[in-house]
Amino acid sequence: MAQEKVQTSQGLTELAQETEAEIEKLTEEIEQEPKAIPGGSPRKARRRGLKKLLHKLRKDYVPRMKKSKKQKKSSLDATAIPRRTMMCLGNN
């Protein structure tokens, strides 16, 4: 995924969906494996890692990105009012 997409909440949501699809694919492949694999299944290890990543994306990164976007918007609105006031006062 492009670096620009990952820097937005929508891009992170898309990344989470792609990760979830990959987890589903791995789960189907794991079901086809024999029950006991010596040393553990590499697919299960990959799935565990992806599940951890998906959890972080959904519980941490996406909400943080949305909150950051909201705060930036409100701070721009808050700074715009004093600037306009100062411009009006400066013109008189």
Image: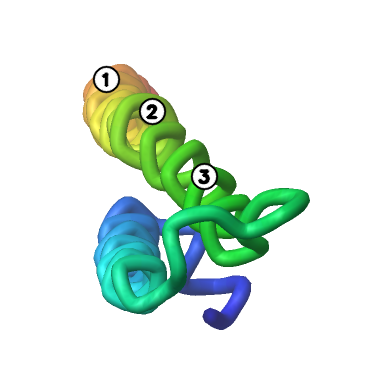
The tag earlier along the polypeptide, 3 or 2, is 3
Q: Are marks 1 and 2 in contact (CB under 8 Å)?
A: no
**Visible in this render: residue 92?**
no
Task: Nearest to the eye among marks 1 and 3: give it.
Answer: 3
Residue 34 image position (x, y, % from top left): 45, 68
Q: Residues within 10 Å of mark 1 (few under 14, many from 20)?
A: few
Residue 24 image position (x, y, % from top left): 26, 68
SS label for mark 1: helix
Numbered label attached to residue 48: 3
Residue 48 lies, with reference to residue 81, above or below; the image says: below
Residue 28 image position (x, y, % from top left): 27, 74
The tag earlier along the polypeptide, 1 or 3, is 3
Residue found at x 38% / y 28%:
64
State the residue position of label 1: 78
As measured in the structure, the alpha-carbon distance from the residue carrying label 1 to the one carrying label 2 is 21 Å
Left or right relative to 61: residue 25: left
Residue 72 image position (x, y, % from top left): 36, 33
Q: Are marks 3 and 2 in contact (CB under 8 Å)?
A: no
Q: Mark 1 is on which residue type? A: Ala
Left or right relative to 84: residue 42: right
Task: Nearest to the eye among marks 3 and 2: give it.
Answer: 3
State the residue position of label 2: 64
The tag earlier along the polypeptide, 1 or 2, is 2
Q: Mark 3 is on which residue type? A: Arg
Residue found at x 54% / y 73%:
4
Q: Mark 2 is on which residue type? A: Arg
Quadrant of the image containing the C terminus: top left
SS label for mark 2: helix
